[in-house]
Amino acid sequence: MAPCAGCFLLAVLFSANCKVITFLDPMCTEKEASRAYNCENLGLKEIPDTLPNTTEFLEFGFNFLPTIQNTTFSRLTNLIFLDLTRCQINWVHEDTFQNHHQLNTIVLTGNPLIFMAETSLNGPTSLKHLFLTQTGISNLEFIPVHNLGNLESLHLGSNHISSINLPENFPTQNLKVMDFQNNAIHYISSKDINALEQVANLNFNGNDVKGIEPGAFNSKIFQSLKFGGTLDLSIILKGLQNSTIQSLWLGTFEDTDDQDLTSAMLEGLCEMSVESINLQKHHFSGFSPSTFQCFTGLRELDLTATHLRELPSGLEGMSSLKKLVLSANSFEQLCQISAASFPSLTDLYIKGNTRKLDLGTRCLEKLENLRKLDLSHSDIEAPDCCNLQLQNLSQLQHLNLSYNEPFGLQDQAFKECPRLELLDLAFTQLRVSAPQSPFQNLHLLQVLNLSNCLLDTSNENLLAGLLDLRHLNLHGNNFQDGSLSKTNLLQPVGSLETLILSSCDLLSIDQQAFHNLGKMSHLDLSHNRLTGDSIDALSHHKGIYLNLAANNIHIIPPRLLLILSQQSTINLGHNPLDCTCSNIHFIMWYQENLQKLEGSGETVCANPPFLRGVKLSDVKLSCGITRVGIFFLMVFVFLLIILLIFSGKSILRWKYQHI
Ligand SMILES: *[C@@H]1O[C@H](CO)[C@@H](O)[C@H](O)[C@H]1NC(C)=O
Ligand SMILES: *[C@@H]1O[C@H](CO)[C@@H](O)[C@H](O)[C@H]1NC(C)=O
Ligand SMILES: *[C@@H]1O[C@H](CO)[C@@H](O)[C@H](O)[C@H]1NC(C)=O
Ligand SMILES: *[C@@H]1O[C@H](CO)[C@@H](O)[C@H](O)[C@H]1NC(C)=O
Ligand SMILES: *[C@@H]1O[C@H](CO)[C@@H](O)[C@H](O)[C@H]1NC(C)=O
Ligand SMILES: *[C@@H]1O[C@H](CO)[C@@H](O)[C@H](O)[C@H]1NC(C)=O
């Protein structure tokens, strides 16, 4: 009887009354309360009643609305943005948006439009952006343009438009962007361009323009013009004679079977004024100094993926060029770009080189104005970097060496670039000869990305000298024994504001590990194996954004809740949290501080089994003794008394019998 009674008592005392409250998810997801909703891909045939009248931003794509009319959206008169992508809309009836005076953007992309009534777009007089991409339009007359005087961008890509001859009353006074890409426009006349004079940005990519009337662009000024994917570029360049263009996009696409570029084809460039040109993915047939003869006025040149193995040395007159993009080419050695031809460069991009790129020595030494250098993803291997390789780059501010092969870094490896503000070495294995700091002289460095560098984190001098470092990413580097100890590599970087230590396989953090990081405001410790105890390390910090997602936190004892309370935002998602009474203080704190917590959808119970997967915010625990508990307790005490009386009697009886 006795052990059983014990069980009974325990059962009573710990009879926690757990109740789970779940909410029925509404069909549309709320992105911002009473303003922004997403109802995409729900098979809806009408606007659901659950959407409030106050909705301003509505993503309603991938539903089924074959006709839309004045009743369809009549309730939602506050709409500002309406996305109706691929709703199988055929008919847009009269006055569909009659009371939608604030409507600014309508997206009708991917609807097979058969009919749009004259007055269908009458209501939204402030309409600025209209997307009619992939709607089967073949004639601009189809678009009901009354009252669209405020239109700023009109997107007509992937249709069957063959002529850009605008109808008489077409409202161009505020139009800034017209997108005609992937239509069937083969000829452009002076009249067409005169009508589009106001429109600063025109996109004719993928139209295979075969003719432009001579003089059509004479003394016209554009912000950006795109003629990508044209088979014969010389037609375009001749046609653009005497125009002024800020940015000219003449790249081509993988599936375009265009002609190789010759110096003769590019001659037209000499007859216009262009600031920036993009020739991505073209082939040059033979590259000589004369190829660049009409590039001399350029400020920006993009030659991404143009199959280059070298640039000829001795190019002349390229001294206005500020930005050069040579990404995704096939250089073997950095000196093959003939950097000396571009003495004014401030930005140089050579990322994703398709061959192993050798940095050589002093290849960039003439680029004394270089501010930004991107050499990422270029298979670079450098056993002893980077002073010879980056010699004379004294103005360099941004250096991207991420995603390369192993780099060996000696003491003061970036001595040649003392003005560096950002250094990205992510995913490049670093071999640092301890105990020195390769970054010693980088007093101006603010951002250092060392994620996945396979660092030796036990080198306490690694970051010495980084007096102004604000942002440090150490994601994916491991620490000895999985612990961040009291003395660690973070000691020298007291000005740090953002510290990323995610996926570092950390098991514990010493209470003093961050004691000198008084300015820290963002700490990412996600994807480690930390327990609740590591929160102790933040006892002297306040107002931190703290990410502890995907760790090994089961229980957070009351003394640590004080430390959490003084931080600004906390993410505890994907932890194996305990939802029993031994964690009741934490659960109560959690529910009282929901406004501080991020990722509450992923913050769920792991234990006890019957609560697994339930959101912490929905759990109701009562850990006192319940009424049923009190009843059983009284019954138990009563039984115990009877038992005592009986046993007392028996003992007395036994005693008397043996006198
Ligand atoms: C919609 O149009 C019909 C026919 O023109 C009209 O009778 C009805 O009043 C309109 N509904 C609204 C909500 O304006
Ligand atoms: C929403 O608008 C409809 C039609 O305009 C109206 O009947 C309804 O009362 C409004 N609902 C609310 C909650 O204001
Ligand atoms: C370009 O301008 C020049 C000088 O003003 C003029 O002679 C020439 O005819 C113009 N070219 C075209 C195609 O209009
Ligand atoms: C290095 O840059 C300086 C200006 O900072 C320049 O005068 C000098 O010519 C450059 N050195 C070499 C070897 O090009
Ligand atoms: C460096 O290059 C990589 C890969 O091209 C890119 O993902 C990263 O954003 C770049 N870093 C910076 C700071 O722009
Ligand atoms: C390295 O970190 C910087 C700063 O957060 C970021 O801009 C950059 O994209 C990161 N690099 C890579 C390769 O992700």
Image: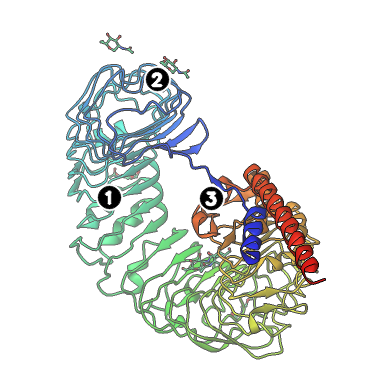
Whether residues under marks 2 and 1 lie with C-beta atoms below 8 angstroms apart, the answer is: no
Image-quadrant location for residue 362:
bottom right
Q: Is residue 570 left or right of residue 154?
A: right
- State how far apart marks 3 and 2 are (Cα): 34 Å
Q: Which residue is mark 1?
A: 205
> How packed is label 1: few (under 14 Cα within 10 Å), some, or many (20 or more)?
many
Residue 108 pos. (x, y %): 29, 35
Q: Mark 3 vs mark 1: which is more N-terminal? A: 1
Of 629 and 590, nearer the camera is 629
Q: Which residue is mark 3?
A: 615
Q: Is residue 112 above or below residue 532?
A: above
Q: Is residue 357 above or below residue 564?
A: below
Q: Is residue 627 left or right of residue 291?
A: right
In the image, which is nearer the foreground, mark 3 or mark 1? 3
- State how far apart marks 2 and 1 are (Cα): 39 Å
Mark 1 lies on a secondary structure that is loop
In the image, which is nearer the foreground, mark 3 or mark 2? 3
Q: Is residue 542 left or right of residue 611?
A: right
Q: Residue at x 29, y 40 (%)?
A: 62
For label 2, being within 8 Å of ligand 2 is answered: yes
Q: Mark 2 vs mark 1: which is more N-terminal? A: 2
Q: Which residue is mark 2?
A: 75
For label 3, being within 8 Å of ligand 2 is answered: no
